[in-house]
Amino acid sequence: MPEHYRPITSSLRSRLLILTFFFVMVVSVFVYLPSIATYRLEFLEKRLENAQIAALALEERGDNAVSPQLEERLLDQSGVIAVILRKEDKSLFLGFNVMPEEVDASYDLRTTSLGMLIFDAYDVLDTGGSRVIRVVGAPMNSNTRWLEITLDEAELYENLRNYSNNVLVLAIIVSLFTGILVYLALHWMLVRPIRRVKDSIVSFRRSPELPNKVKMGRNRSDEIGLVQRELARMQEEVRQSLKQKSNLAALGEAVAKINHDLRNVLATAQLASDALQRVDHPRVQKVSRRLMTAVSRAIALCEATIRHGKAEDPLPEKADVELRDLVYDVGSSLGLMDGGEFHFDVDMDEHFSVYVDSEQFHRVLLNLCRNAGEVQGPDGTIEITAEKDTAGTSHIRVKDQGPGIPEAVRPNLFKAFSSAKAGGTGLGLAAARDIVLAHGGQIGLESTGENGSTFIICMPPSDEGTGK
């Protein structure tokens, strides 16, 4: 079924209108039932009152009797067939000669309940007014102990039926007007905003990369306004994420091509390094070994990237590694130990070991030390310390004396493309974090300020508990 076509009963607006009409009719039924019971009760009480007044004419006669013509007129005006009135010393009768021998039903209005009144009123409508009933009620005078009337239900039935029809028509009119008013209110307050949300979702599903053209209410303080604002915020975040993923996909394709050509360039550099190693000069030998190691690591990284199709490291091949040698190798690779005014201090036991993948952890320390060296300049200081706690966890700290990390950058410090230094990408810290997490460890910024920053790496012990 096309999206633009909807049956009349499938829309939210029509359902609200139908439900409102239905609920008002249900309420009208609960109002109608007590109302007809009350109407019947008032009708019978009025007949009892009229009958008692008519019976007073008998007291004016000493013999408690009136002429047949007057009796007929009194009964006709009272709307009853017969009246029985008993006092303490005497009984009064009207219509005794025309009183039927049997009646179809008897009711005592002195002892009744709402449920019984409703049931009795329903009986009147159900029988169609064809019954003759006897009704006992409470007398108006205190010296009267019994008041009973006999009447035909035909008039009561006609009046009650007309009353029911009027109530039904009124209920329908009230239901329609109430339904329309409630519908208009709900349409303005709920349906229209929800339709905007629906249109926004449909538009976003069709073209998630395009800006949302559907106007969303920004000034509402209720739940609808909150939903609209959160939806707009979520769509914007998803849109930015899609845009970033598209950029990253294009960047990944470019990096893959560059990585392929870079491997060829590094292979040429490796051949040049081999040639330098054959030069019999101590300084050249030292520099060539450092260059050879760096080129070999670069080639291995390029090959791993091409092999895995993305810049993620394979699972670490962990072993006990002496950290001191690894740290010195990092310092040598960055040229931090070539003398000059830069201080590269290592404070740990000579045989302090960690359970890591040597090559991957070398990249972690290399990224941290490179960042620390770049933010300080040629006369900075890097201090690397390491210790173990009672559980065997290694705590490695890399401390510098740089200007500190801005507060705005700290929440996203280990996310890609959120570098704390100018011209950086933040990929180094992101890569370091991924490697440490893959080892089951943790890395974080322990402290930062005007006197420098300290990064801490916590690495778990080996399964066998080895390491010092």
Image (spheres, rainbow, N blue to C red):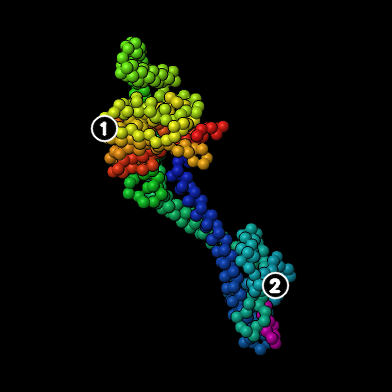
Q: Quadrant of residue 43?
A: bottom right
Q: Residue furthest bottom?
A: 62
Please tell me which residue is depicted at 64% across the width and 72% down the height of the picture: 109
Q: Amino acid at mark 1?
A: Glu
Instruction: List the residue tagged with mark 2.
Output: 99
The x and y percentages for residue 325 are 42, 27
Q: Tell me, yes or no, if residue 21 can be seen here.
A: yes
Residue picked out by circle 1: 341
Give residue 337's quadrant in the image.
top left
- Image point 36% across, 32% down: which residue? 368
* 121, 193: nearer the viewer: 193
Q: Secondary structure at mark 1?
A: loop
Write down the quadrant of residue 214 in the picture.
top left
Up the image or down, 435 lies above or below 41; here it is above
Q: Which residues are magenta?
A: 82-91
Q: Is the residue marked by circle 2 packed among few (<14), some (14-19), or many (20+) residues within 10 Å?
A: some
In depth, the one of 233 and 262 nearer the eye is 262
Q: Residue at x 54, y 61 (%)?
A: 31
- Find the residue positioned furthest to the right: 101
